[in-house]
Structure formats: structure tokens, C-alpha cells
Amino acid sequence: MNIRGRTALVTGAGSGIGRSTAVMLAERGAARVWLLDRDEAGAGQTAQRLTELGCDGIVRAFDVTDFARLEGVFAEAEARGGLDIVFNNAGMVVGLELFPETSAERIHAIVDLNLKAVIFGTQFAVRQMRGRGGGVVINTSSGAALHTGFRDWLYTATKAGVLAFSKSCLPLRDACNVRVNAVLPGLVDTPILKTTGDGELADWMAPILASNVALPPEAIAEAVIRIVEDDAMAGEGVEVRGG
């Protein structure tokens, strides 16, 4: 897909991979990007950068696990011309409550955000894209879904679910010209790392940091752009690692 003139929606757009991807979409000529994040200030900063690039950044600040409101934003986007690209990127780690000590509330929260919000986001996207000739959906999984060593097992489970779900959406390419893929970041230097502990890196992250190169979020954004632009890619998982 040629990104120039297209409209995209990015969740988790207030920082990290989401912000970098939104900016890169604008740099590629996207006309409008819907920026979803519960961090209104962060999303606003992303929107300001898009404005500087000549792209219309529209902020909607809320938690995307409010699925009724999420559907409402998709409907709003459809009423204003529709979506060509959707990047379901928002996610979280469990933090200090590692399994099996994780509370039921925290389990529900991580499954709702990391997996259910991706499924609903894909559903809402496909329903409108099929009526306008097709589109592209990219879902953020994680390299943790493929490798051992990441001790947040609930995070790993949800990200493995995202990968399996995205790959199983392959038939949508032929059914309605919607390509669904997953991107699998390795270690990335984003604010989410410090949520593994109490505002700091968890002790168990030390060996992971020692054996991996932390990528800048722009490296993942570049992979997302490649997926969007490669019309042959559907039902795939693209891993991006720093070595």
C-alpha cells in the first residue's frame, strides 16, 4: 500500500513504538492519523509533531479496553472518510505482580489490553475496510512469544495469542482484501521497560538487558511501515531484534 494520502489509526500513540510509527506514517505522506492513548498529554505531543509534518493528528484520550468507546472511535473515523491502516499497538506488562502472585484484577487487565483490545480493534477495522476495498492491520505481539527468559508469563501468553490470532487472519486477504500481520519487537527502549518494576527496571530484567541490544522504537516503526507497504504480506509475524 502506498501510504501517501491514507488515513491510519494507532493505539498507544502517546509514546514509544506508537508515537514513532505515527510520526513515520506522517513522514511517508499519511493525510490523517487517529491517535489513541489514555495519556492525553503524550498523544497531544505526538499530534503536534504530526502537525509539523503536515499531517492531521486526531487525539482521542481513553483506555482502549473500553471496547464500546473504541468501537465508537472507529465509527467516528468511518464517518470522516474511513481507515486504511490500523496499528493495534497498546500494551502493558504485569509489573510487580508476577505469576502466580498476580491478582485476578491484574490478570483481567493485561488480557483485556494485550489481547482482547487487539481482537476488537482488528474486528472493527476489518468491518469497515472490507466496505472500502481493503486495508492493512498490524498487531503488536512480542519476541517474548517465541523465546524463553521473559519472566512475565502472562505478558508472554497474551503476546503469543496476538501472534496466533494475526496469523489465523490470513484468509481475510482473499475474503475482503484486508491484510492482517503481527510485528514482534525484541527489547525496545520505551517507557514500558520501567513498568516491569515499581517505576524502575525489575531485577529479573538484568540478564535480558545483558544479552540483548535495546532497539530504538523507530526500528519497530520501520518494520510496521514495511508491512504496510508490502502488498504480499498477510498472516505473517515479523520479528525485530537487536541481536
Image (cartoon, grey):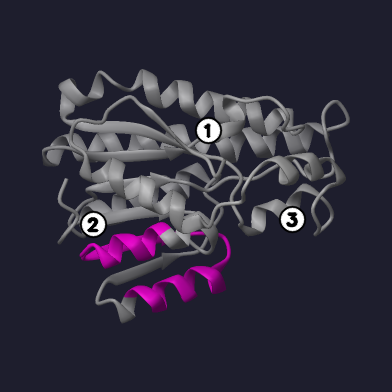
Give the total number of marks visible in the rendering: 3
Residue type at tag 2: Thr
Badge 2: residue crowd in 10 Å (few <14, some 14–19, many ≥20): many
Question: Residue 127: where, in percent of width, then height?
Answer: 26, 35
Q: Which residue is mark 2?
A: 7
Residue range highlighted in magenta: 21-50
Residue type at tag 3: Lys
Sequence-first disc among 2 and 1: 2
2 and 1 marks in contact (CB < 8 Å)? no
1 and 3 marks in contact (CB < 8 Å)? no
Which structural element holds mark 1? Answer: helix
Badge 1: residue crowd in 10 Å (few <14, some 14–19, many ≥20): many
Q: Cα distance, mark 3 to mark 2? A: 32 Å
Question: Residue 45: where, in percent of width, then height?
Answer: 48, 75
Question: Residue 75: where, in percent of width, then height?
Answer: 30, 50
Q: Cα distance, mark 1 to mark 3? A: 24 Å
In the image, residue 33 lies in the stretch drawn in magenta: yes
With 201 as the anchor, is 10 left or right in this view? Answer: left
Residue type at tag 1: Lys
150 and 49: which one is in front?
Answer: 150
Residue plotted at (22% across, 45% down): 229
Q: Which mark is residue 194?
A: 3
Q: Which residue is mark 1?
A: 116
Identify the main secondary structure in magenta: helix
Against 149, is 88 above or below?
below
Which structural element holds mark 2? Answer: strand
Sequence-first disc among 1 and 3: 1
